[in-house]
Amino acid sequence: MGNLFPGGLRRAIVRQTEHALRSGALQPIVTEKRFIEDAGVRFLVRVVPALQRKDAEREQRAAGAKPANPFLPPEPDLLVGEVSPTHRAVLNKFNVIEHHLLLVTREFQPQERLLDQADFDALARCMGELDGLGFYNGGEAAGASEAHKHLQMVPLPLADEGPPVPVAPLIAGARGDGPILTVPGFPFRHALVRLEPAAWDAAEVAVRLLDAYRRLLAAVDIREVPSEGAPCQSGPYNLLLTRDWMLAVPRSRECCEGISVNALGFAGSLFLRRPEALEPLERLRPMGLLAHVGLPLA
């Protein structure tokens, strides 16, 4: 396993993906892509087709049968490499998006723990190598499926057509009197900051990311609460960031009418485990779904 930095992360992800596919450790979930226009956003909707449903359910059962902590240690065939003294990069075993990367703490930390400098150091190093969307599902109600703290990153663009992030047209119109902005058209509580590093020096950017993160959580009233002597979140939330912006969204629940939503939903990318979920999604509309799982605007 070679050095990931500088310049080796992309090659390592491709190489490990090919190896993990050959070994069977990586089990991509086959989906059909659809687009639903709503509120100025062309939402990308990935649907598990009916013929793939049994396979997908079997994969989900296998995921449920895995050890209590699949990241300690991770499957060797899924391990991309060591990102930092505190984090390692692991392929998402049941991936919907190709080259979906998990940035996992080497030692166990709960997913409800607040992100810290080490988390952003690891994320900044990876985002300096790859143009991607970083995200965090802060708690089960925000779509987290594992209790071990892990950030995630997927390559951009999310779709073969349209903007790299589907919600980008709305984010371009974000406004506010200070550094904390809101996005007209988002019918749920949120806060956004623009990121404008002069150059992507990972160490410098990581400090800025941590500062922006803390400002955003304060803006959406996610507070620090102590738990077993460590700083944890007062409520569930999603965090998304590109090289240009960071968005925080507090959550009320994980799903609505059987449709589960994680951070990617707020980027304009939804995943339906069953074709039957298209009917409630068409009725609710994607923005309506996001409003149901978020919190109302103040």
Image (cartoon, rainbow, N blue to C red):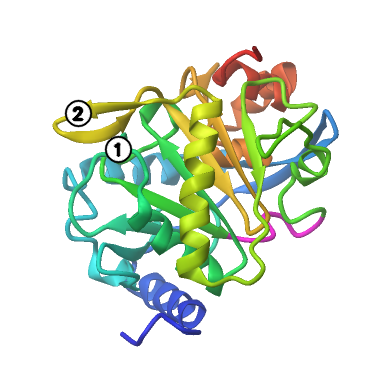
Q: What residue is pinned by disc 2? A: 227
User: Which amino acid, by three-letter code, is at mark 1?
Assistant: Arg
Residue that appears at 24% across and 64% down: 75
User: Considering depth in this image, is 255 or 138 the residue closer to the camera?
Assistant: 138
Q: Which residues are magenta?
A: 155-161
Q: Secondary structure at mark 2?
A: strand
Residue that appears at 24% across and 39% down: 110
Q: Which one is earlier in the sequence, the residue at label 1 or at label 2?
A: 1
Q: Are marks 1 and 2 in contact (CB under 8 Å)?
A: yes
Identify the residue at the far left of this view. 228
Q: Is residue 160 magenta?
A: yes
Residue that appears at 50% across and 42% down: 213
**Callout 2: few (<14), some (14-19), or many (20+) C-alpha neighbours within 10 Å?**
few
Between the C-alphas of marks 1 and 2, the distance is 9 Å
User: Considering depth in this image, is 230 or 26 the residue closer to the camera?
Assistant: 230
Q: Is residue 292 visible?
A: yes
Q: Is residue 187 magenta?
A: no
User: Which amino acid, by three-letter code, is at mark 2?
Assistant: Ser
Q: What residue is pinned by disc 1? A: 113
